Image (cartoon, rainbow, N blue to C red):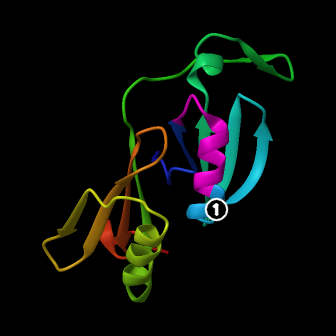
Amino acid sequence: MKLNRIIETCLYSRNLERSERFYSETLGLNLIRKEENRHLFYRCGNTMLLIFNPIHTNQEQTYVNGNKIPLHGTTGAAHIAFSVERNQFKSWKSHLKEKGIEIESSVKWPGGLKSIYFRDPAGNSLEIIESGMWNIEE
């Protein structure tokens, strides 16, 4: 038996309105589902990015079809990385700067791939990296 892939990952934000503007307008992700002050669900390629308000998901029990969803939430900055085609990397770096997003760090990895790190409005650490990292690109 083996796990095949991660199909969703989650970040937390106490201000979903600001997060929605950032992920929809700045990063251009497609918002699939939203529940006011509880969650945002975005499609990113063939995976999902979930953004939950931990005040809700860590304290208010949720049921789906009578089944309990475990409470969850976190404090502090989480991290996720987005892959982009190598020929789009410079454009993304320029796009973020034009939107007033501070690039915290630029890294050239062994093997030559480049990535940049920046923050979302909730303080989560985001990375954009040229495709090919971990040799798992589809």
Give the crowd class for mark 1: few <14, some 14-19, many >=20 residues within 10 Å.
few
When asked about the image quadrant of residue 15, the answer is: top right
Residue depicted at 61% across the width and 43% down the height: 18
Between 13 and 130, the one lying in front of the other is: 13
Residue depicted at 41% across the width and 77% down the height: 94
Between 24 and 78, the one lying in front of the other is: 24
Query: Is label 1 in a helix, a strand or a loop?
Result: helix
Q: Residue 104: where, in percent of width, then height? A: 26, 56
Between 123 and 130, the one lying in front of the other is: 123
Residue depicted at 25% across the width and 74% down the height: 114
Under mark 1, the amino acid is Glu
Q: Residue 8: where, in percent of width, then height? A: 57, 47
Q: Residue 23: where, in percent of width, then height? A: 59, 55
Q: Which residue is mark 1?
A: 25
On the picture, is 83 further left or further right than 26?
A: left
When asked about the image quadrant of residue 35, the answer is: top right
Q: Find the magenta span and give its range.
A: 12-23
Q: Is residue 29 magenta?
A: no
